[in-house]
Image (cartoon, coloured by chain):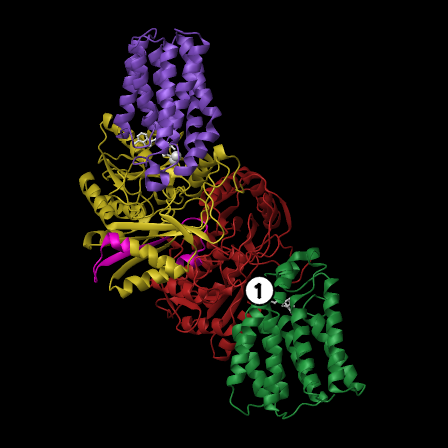
Chain colours: A red, B yellow, C green, D purple
Amino acid sequence: MKKVINAPEQVVEEMLQGIALAHPQYVRRVEGFDVIVRANAPVAGKVALVSGGGSGHEPSHGGFVGKGMLDGAVAGAVFTSPTPDQVYEAIKAVDGGKGVLLVIKNYTGDVMNFDMAAEMAEADGIKVAKVIVNDDVAVENSTWTTGRRGIAGTVFVHKIAGAKAETGADLEAVQQVAEKVIANVRSMGMALTPCTVPAAGKPGFTLAENEVEIGLGIHGEPGTHREELRSADETTAHLMEKILADLQLAAGDEVAVLVNGLGATPLMELYVVNRKVHQILGDAGMKIAKTLVGNYMTSLEMAGFSISLLKLDGETKELLFAAADTPAFVQV
Amino acid sequence: MKKVINAPEQVVEEMLQGIALAHPQYVRRVEGFDVIVRANAPVAGKVALVSGGGSGHEPSHGGFVGKGMLDGAVAGAVFTSPTPDQVYEAIKAVDGGKGVLLVIKNYTGDVMNFDMAAEMAEADGIKVAKVIVNDDVAVENSTWTTGRRGIAGTVFVHKIAGAKAETGADLEAVQQVAEKVIANVRSMGMALTPCTVPAAGKPGFTLAENEVEIGLGIHGEPGTHREELRSADETTAHLMEKILADLQLAAGDEVAVLVNGLGATPLMELYVVNRKVHQILGDAGMKIAKTLVGNYMTSLEMAGFSISLLKLDGETKELLFAAADTPAFVQV
Amino acid sequence: MSSFTVAALEAVADTIVQNKELLTSLDAAIGDADHGINMARGFEAVRVKIRAAAPGTDISGLLKLTGMTLISTVGGASGPLYGTAFMRAAAAAQGKATLDPDGITQIWSAALQGIKDRGKASRGEKTMLDAMEPAYEAFVEAVKAEKSLVESLDAACEAAKEGIEYTKTIIATKGRASYLGERSLGHQDPGATSSYLMLAALTEFCRSQQLGA
Amino acid sequence: MSSFTVAALEAVADTIVQNKELLTSLDAAIGDADHGINMARGFEAVRVKIRAAAPGTDISGLLKLTGMTLISTVGGASGPLYGTAFMRAAAAAQGKATLDPDGITQIWSAALQGIKDRGKASRGEKTMLDAMEPAYEAFVEAVKAEKSLVESLDAACEAAKEGIEYTKTIIATKGRASYLGERSLGHQDPGATSSYLMLAALTEFCRSQQLGA
Ligand SMILES: Nc1ncnc2c1ncn2[C@@H]1O[C@H](COP(=O)(O)OP(=O)(O)O)[C@@H](O)[C@H]1O
Ligand SMILES: Nc1ncnc2c1ncn2[C@@H]1O[C@H](COP(=O)(O)OP(=O)(O)O)[C@@H](O)[C@H]1O
Ligand SMILES: [Mg+2]
Ligand SMILES: [Mg+2]
Ligand SMILES: [Mg+2]
Ligand SMILES: [Mg+2]
């Protein structure tokens, strides 16, 4: 294992210190907890958003704490859902009196830990609402009751629900728009290489030279199948086909695109993928209102990418374009 | 070679298409050339900035084309300086009548190709000035006449000279502040893994498991030496020592920090490095005005990082904090 | 009884820490390769906490301490599940100064229900329940048949072991392994394995104490 | 003479394209592993351009086309250097309808000066000049000694080859290899090698044409 770290046990702690030191204008650490909140938290008169999950997906979620997106982010051990007490601290630190929306990616552990935290906060009289993001079309919804996983599409939920909260909307309205985003966002990814959880010391799986995994999860959970590496255009077309089959867009629909790097994929390659995504959508007569290309939801040093499509309506489009000011996403 | 591409010969072309499709609000492609310019280029009444170099360093430089930074970026073949005719096109496309500053990284090829382009543009009556960035302290200035290389510190030149140009300053003033940044910025990097130029098909060098290269250039040029991988804190301290020996800061000095990922290094690790950088500077009594952590000047999928320190004065600090709006760097 | 409970919990903690690699590698095959890491982190903390607990803390207090520690250190799916199990066990153990088979049955039943409430899974979904529930039923039956505590625990262990084998034959429909669909076949569930290991450690501990043998 | 020049340039282009891997691997050792890729890209373009050139384009015109094509396709350090060399050669060849040894000397001298002007290097810095300049001098001397064109070119090739060997013994102080300091010792310079290869191809071409033999 070749990593720029001091010790696997310290990596999350030291990362959080590094984040707080880098971005004091945006965020601060909640003393004694693995929680990053806005520097000025709690923001009075605004619904607060809390997200989080295992670490190793940076800039998710700490990088999206700031104006127009999240109020707090909880960092679990690498690839492991954070514990309820940590989430509970985050909720308490950001609640400005209008309640807190938890943005949870659909993993059993995340859902249970955030649930327990919500119960704890509600016992304190804090209003808490939850949304569960499940954008990964690689995992069929029907067959397995756990449902689809939450992956990179989550960033759109942060952006749009965060913008809604910034308007002064109440908890129910913020939750509603988050649900709308979740209903309209679909993603799928693929990986060229595995990654190594520091505490494990070795890769979570192996791929032969020239073999790729299609539909892989952001924690290295196996995908739909393995195949020989194809061209960027072929792979992109394959992922787009799966996404479009599920999202069912019509010509004239307006969408937002996120071509997300998993950690070790050069931006050069992500742009090559983006080119094909635009071609496919353009050929189908869809309008692309906004495109994001880069590392938004990573899996440590995994090489690969995911594509997310969000179908927009008037409200979500306006909120998507609203100003945001966070360490990893700024928009004027 | 495992890459998300279609063909090595097409990768720069397709990347440029992907960039133009992703960010139409910021940039456009100069038809027929490997040149990205501001969507509204040429901007009248403003000195224009052009940078560029080999491709494979994304988001450098196309990602920094926009308000408050560059006006144009020229993309050479992967890791190969662009040719003079391409640079010449960029100059012509962005000149708004107040002249063009070329921001060149100090490599023989870059310097010669940009020089030839400047001659061509000057023959057309365009005012052209040049600055040569040479921030890499791994390469001693004295012994070798080629001088130090230009690496990630270049991003500070784009930011600060770009902000100066936005104030309406004339070419000489913009060049002067660029020179000031260059005189005050120092960088050094290290790599854990090599990277593969698509056209070459195999890694440019090899490192044993647990071996790292200290002082490596952004094109995989060998560094000062190889050693066994040490802890993040030890490696960071070593690079900082070299940088501080050259930059000669005094307690009370104000600096900007860039912890730059080379492509495959998780943000998590960059933040661990940042923590140590802040500790070292804090212990020495220096003030950190701004910190950037992320992939700003990459080497394809190389794992590793560089640290850049910029000593600030009143002028450069104000310009560093000025607004910028580009695909890869937005500041309000 | 309090120091006995501490020792029993330590035995359970030790076995989890010792099997960190095994549990992680089972999770690597059908999950995300962290079950052993998560559980070992939790039970290392439990070891520290229960050793440091005020002398005389009762059974319920120690179980609660264990549950709270697991909840706040394990994370993932197994943290809230095992954490809830111990919290419910603590509630059921309240007022109990010593443990007879009936008391254990009550506590165990509460713990099992806690896992079901929290995880909303049932037997046959390739989870820890596939070890835990048959083990509980075998224990109840053995107690009814007036077997000794150790004998009853042995029966429970046997059933848990069979449960592990059973998980190899089914497709996961809960937890992270469910994403695998048919590819989860042939692999044993990490959580079922950790459940069995804890039970086996408790059984060995009781045997070594010649408790109710 | 025009079709002869086209054929000569094609021979030069062919040798560069054929040696793409060699030049790249030499550059991998002390540079950035692209010299062969750069040069092959450039000379593939040259091949296309000169074949498509208007019939009857004179020597100067063909050299200029080659120089401009190299400048606009090679990039890196070698692009402007070789490009400038051919541009200067074109200027020196202006008005020349055929080439005698004296004419070649003039053209070569101009090309060499172009490289020096552009790269600001001199002999002994481990660059293409360490092959090019001794080769030029050997050629001039052989012509003075009234050797035939092919004999003179052979002498130049010999000197260029020695120049390559010499680059192994010195530290680079120009170009990308200079960052290596002492670690550049023992390696031969890629640019010196490409210079030699071009010269050797030209020589073989002249020999095959039994030109001035
Ligand atoms: N809904 C559930 N009910 C009961 N047990 C579950 C459930 N979901 C997962 N598990 C158990 O949790 C185990 C995985 O735990 P762990 O690896 O620590 O968490 P994670 O899956 O979040 O990484 C599985 O092997 C399974 O036994
Ligand atoms: N200043 C210079 N003068 C003459 N030749 C040079 C100079 N700098 C570099 N070279 C030559 O260029 C060669 C490298 O070319 P190439 O690899 O194509 O460019 P780059 O170094 O930009 O990648 C070196 O081997 C050397 O012979
Ligand atoms: Mg996990
Ligand atoms: Mg090069
Ligand atoms: Mg797991
Ligand atoms: Mg080179």
The residue carrying pointer 1 sits among few (fewer than 14), some (14 to 19) or many (20 or more) residues within 10 Å by Cα, namely: many
Tag 1's secondary structure? loop
* Placement of the N terminus of chain D among the 4 image quadrants: top left
The answer to whether residue D50 is visible is no
- A290 left or right of C141 in image: left
Quarter of the rendered image showing ligand 1: bottom right
- Start-end of magenta stretch: B243-271
User: Which residue is at 29% across, 46% downward?
Assistant: B135
Relative to residue D144, is residue C47 depicted above or below?
Answer: below
Please provide percent x and percent y for residue D98: 34, 6
Q: Nearer the viewer, residue D209 or B248?
A: D209
Locate the C terminus of chain D by quadrant. Answer: top left
**Residue B270: within the magenta?**
yes
> Residue at label 1?
C34
Is the residue indicated by label 1 positioned so its CB lies within 8 Å of ligand 3?
Answer: yes
Query: Quick check: B73 above or below C92?
Result: above
